[in-house]
Image (cartoon, rainbow, N blue to C red):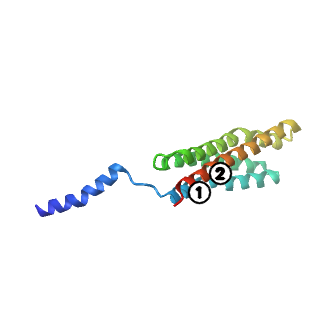
Amino acid sequence: MKKIISKTFVILPLLIMIACGTKKDPIQYNNDLMTVINGSEKHITDMNTAMQSNNYEQAEKVQKEWYDSVSKDIKKVEDIGDFNGDANLQNAILTGLKGYKKIVEDDYPKLIELRKNKVENPANEEKLLNNINQAFEVMANGVNKASSKFEKDYAK
């Protein structure tokens, strides 16, 4: 009987912790999300390198890899979830990743195609480049704003 009672005292607190959920560490949470979104930096660098060297086959390869990667990254951020009920940072990261996905899916293939086929259309090329640059700026600003707020709200 003593064994049953002592096991109950060990198991019961564990079950209560699982049922109530455990608090997430704000530093680890922030780092986990930032690590995911910062993974796109490699693809940005690879894309810029390929485009600047006129290696459009490589640019197409980077675009496909980046698309697959950002799709997985969106899933990772969704799986990480909110921070103890606060989804602001998570939503900003998801918005940023979905923004990356949109330009990787829409704008980059059009830009690659224009340059690959040596189509002289400066207005369209400039429009695509502006779309890409503005999207990066909007995403970065949104993530930075949410990250600063998160840091302020949860600083120890």
The residue sitting at 45% across, 55% down in the picture is 24
For this rendering, which residue is in front, 21 or 52? 21
Is residue 114 something one can see in this rendering? Answer: yes
Q: Which residue is drawn at 81% across and 43% down?
A: 116
108 or 21: nearer the viewer? 21
The residue type indicated by label 1 comes to Thr
Given residues 127 and 69, the one toward you in this image is 127
- Position of the N terminus by quadrant: bottom left
Give me the C-alpha separation between circle 1 and circle 2. Answer: 14 Å
Q: Which mark is residue 144?
A: 2
Residue 2 x/y as whole percent? 12, 63
Q: Position of residue 96 (x, y in %)?
A: 63, 45
Which amino acid is tagged 2?
Asn
- Residue 15: horizontal and vertical position, in percent? 29, 53
Q: Can residue 121 be seen in this view?
A: no
Q: Left or right? Give the position of 86 relative to 20.
A: right
Question: What label does residue 35 carry, if any?
Answer: 1
Q: How many labels does the image show?
A: 2
**Dividing the picture into quarters, in which one does residue 111 lie?**
top right
Judged from the image, the secondary structure of the residue bearing numbered disc 2 is helix
Point 25% across, 57% down: residue: 11
Please state which of the two labelled residues, at mark 1 or mark 2, is closer to the viewer. 2
